[in-house]
Image: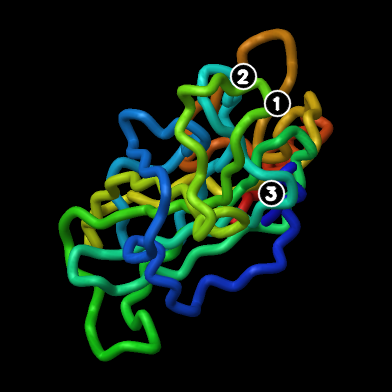
Amino acid sequence: MAFPPEFSSTLTYANRYDLDEIDVFLEGNSSNPMFFSVSGLPNQLSFGKHYFNLSILDPKKQDYKLRDNSRILFEFKSSNNVVLKSDITELNQRNGVATCFVEVLEDPLRTYKEVKDGEGTLTIVGSLRRKRRNTADTIPIPRKFVGAMNYRCTFPIQIRKNLINADSPKVLQSKHEIKTALGNFSFAKNSVTTRKNASTGTLYDVKGVATNIPKKGKATS
């Protein structure tokens, strides 16, 4: 993923990067992320796939900014150092927000360890440069960090593998449309009641026409 954000799904995070262990110039955290924003991630991750949004914060109040064409990498780890599968989806919102996912697998592959419950981490890294308008008292980026992954931000995550109904909502469409749901609903102005002594409710097609009302002398199955 590059900056400015393109958010095409070109990276596979099955590999291990150990982003939490690399040497960086500047460190951020969930209380002061400075450059990255994470939203929509469930408070607790169970088995299954969970979606979240990753976006770039306005660096107006910062002494540095993300370098043009900087790669942005992220990695999830459990408390016992198992890397969770994660990636960017193919959904392109074209608004500076990347829709991403993390998946907690019963068999995490590439390791004999199982994912352990408890506090894990989401680590995000990118490459910073000084702003041109910086004053003389701004600390310059050391030569060894120039052009490298020199900024890291760490967010805590909670893993509860067997939590019931913890899967996050799935993305159904990428367009903003107003549309009625297709299903067993009637859109008549008056309220619709169930037939007297009926053992089942009334089913309606997409045009609001009842489909299972028996004709005289016949019974529904």
Against 9, residue 212 (above or below) is above
Residue 195 horizontal/vertical position (percent)? 56, 28
- Given residues 143 and 87, the one toward you in this image is 143
Nearer-the-camera pick, 199 or 45: 45
**Badge 1 density bin: few <14, some 14–19, many ≥20, Cα 10 Å:** some
In the image, what residue occupies the spot 70% across and 46% down?
3
Q: How many labels does the image show?
A: 3
Residue drawn at the location 54% of the way across and 27% of the way down? 194
Q: Residue furthest top?
A: 190
Q: Which of marks 2 and 3 is nearer the N terminus?
A: 2
Asked which quadrant contains residue 135, the reply is: top right
User: How far separated are the C-alphas under marks 2 and 3?
Assistant: 22 Å
Asked if disc 1 and disc 2 are in contact, CB closer than 8 Å, the reply is yes
Q: Name the residue under label 2.
A: 192
Specify whether 153 is left or right of 159. right
Q: Quadrant of residue 31?
A: top left
C-alpha separation, residue under disc 1 versus residue under disc 2: 7 Å
Kind of residue sitting beneath label 1:
Ser
Q: What element carries label 1?
A: loop
Residue 123 on image: x %, y %: 39, 54
Tell me the quarter of the image containing the C terminus.
bottom right
Which quadrant would the N terminus be assigned to in this image? bottom right
Q: Residue 109 vs residue 96: left or right?
A: left
Residue 141 shows which numbered tag?
Answer: none
Within 10 Å of disc 2 (Cα), the crowding (few <14, some 14-19, many 20+) is few
The residue labelled by disc 3 is 218
Residue 186's mark?
1
Q: Is residue 54 above or below residue 122?
A: above
In this rendering, the label closer to the viewer, 2 or 3: 2
